[in-house]
Amino acid sequence: MTTFFNLTLAGLSSGAVFAALGLSLVIIYRATRVVNFAQPALALISSYVAYSVTKGTGSYWLGFAAAIVVGTVLGIAVERLLVRPLRNAPELSPIIATMGLLLVLQAVAGMIWSNEPHAFSYAFDFRGRFSAADLFAVLAVLVTATGVLLLFKFTSLGLRMRAAAFNPEVARLLGVRVGVMLTLGWGLAAAVGSLAGLLAVPPFISPTVLDEVFVFALTAAVLGGLDNPLGTIVGGLALGIGLSYVAGLLGPELVPLAALAILVSVLAVRPAGLFGRATARRV
Amino acid sequence: MLEIEGLSAHYGPVRALSEVNLKVEEGSITAILGANGAGKTTLLRVISGLVRASGGRVTAFGEDITAMPTDRIARSGVAHVPEGGGVIPELTVEENLRLGALWRPDRADRARALDEVLELFPPLAPRRSKAAGTLSGGERQMLAIGRGLMGRPRMLLLDEPSLGLAPLVAAKIMAVLRDLRADTGLTVLLVEQNARSALSISDYGFVLGLGEVVASDDAATLLADDQLRHAYLGF
Ligand SMILES: Nc1ncnc2c1ncn2[C@@H]1O[C@H](COP(=O)(O)OP(=O)(O)OP(=O)(O)O)[C@@H](O)[C@H]1O
Ligand SMILES: [Mg+2]
């Protein structure tokens, strides 16, 4: 029973990271119908910035703040410089462009910071079953996710962002600056993604450190229906806990296989994801 | 109020409007009539900047808006209710309505506008927190018009507001438009295929045929012109 409890706790903190990174994908997918494959690379660069700033100043939190700021700026830059120019191109073009950017940024990270792993410090004690670092990860993600959901649901900015995502043309007719909403959405998403990166990276940072997390985050987003923020958060947490059981009870080498099995079986039963509302959207 | 001079528009090689001239007087209801494919929707879309003119000029409130971005045209006081209404089904009725006024800075007046619109369209009030996708066709059209009015526009562009509605519901919507104009002096540009009901509340009418203005006159004169009715208006 205690193992079960411990595995649940362990899964919760990794699930929180999947949820946050998944949320960043969903915010963008909803707004632009693009799966942002560059997201882990943006989170990677901002985590490296955190690494350098923390190393230079000795302050974890200064690095943390720098990472969020740099991540946001990168997200905005990607939307403005890479995605927006492709908005009239075939649907697949921006997706391929973000994939390309992923590879480029990983290579750039390797060139600047080397491909060797560096120690990445924690702000909290990370020893033990459910450490202070785990607690921080879960709380940070819950607070952030709640903030994002409240923003979407209860503020006029959030309403404009949703309208711009659901029907850009109608939003324009109602005076919404759709382009600004898209940019804000990418910035917000990249900030959330950077948070996920900061939580996922320790103890070592290297250019490929987020690859596996990204696969799980994408799984969480698909479980959530790709355009449902709340569904993605629930999906991420459930996936984290489920994979923790698999790792603890069956062996860690089965985790990627289990993730794939979960994804395939959910999509077989509910093609729109656990919480998807595909029927309402096809227009 | 609204002046359109020599306006042309193309979809690729297809010419949808050619050299259209048209004037809408302040405080009037002006009908745009014509068969399927005549260019009525295109005309409204060019006015609000969703389709770019390939020639000519659109002037609203004395300002050239031909090249203005759509969101700015909306904020200058032109509310365009698109064909089908453009209600966002995922949002609630109230969210749809609020969306129509968000660009206006005066918060208290936005709340007042919401109350007024709910009063104008009573069926919407009990459904304010329901998803707009659950509304009936008539309620959707009311929501779409109400959302347009939330911005307190100076001019309302309506694209076939009675399309697909039961005659009684369509008549009710026409009556609301007539009363609105009488009470508030709102200028309305009304695109309709149902020429008879549109002309019954209009002051003036333009008839489009294959992208050109083929007739324009007082609504009463158009209604009485048998030849025109047979040739273009189908009643
Ligand atoms: N997106 C488009 N791409 C290509 N051609 C178009 C497009 N939209 C309209 N057209 C063409 O432009 C012409 C005018 O169309 P428009 O929609 O303005 O007519 P309408 O008068 O609104 O017709 P309806 O009464 O059926 O709504 C038609 O010949 C139509 O086929
Ligand atoms: Mg039309």
Image (cartoon, rainbow, N blue to C red):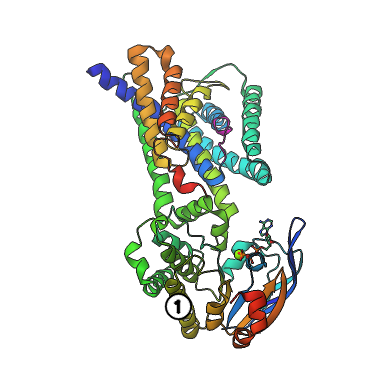
Is B203 situated above or below A222?
below
Relative image position of residue B195 (x, y in whole percent) = 57, 76
Displayed-image quarter of ligand 1: bottom right
Residue at 34%, 22% (x, y): give it. A10
Report which quarter residue B68 is drawn in.
Answer: bottom right
Which residue is identified by label 1?
B176
Report which quarter residue B120 is drawn in.
Answer: bottom left
Report which quarter residue A19 is drawn in.
Answer: top left
Relative image position of residue B235 (x, y in whole percent) = 58, 77
Quadrant including the N terminus of chain A: top left
The reply, left or right, for residue B151 in relation to residue B71 is left
Is A5 situated above or below B157?
above
Q: Nearer the viewer, residue A192 or B38?
A: B38
The reply, left or right, for residue B180 in relation to residue B235 is left
Q: Nearer the viewer, residue B185 or A181?
A: B185
Residue at 45%, 48% (x, y): give it. A280
- Residue range highlighted in magenta: A34-42
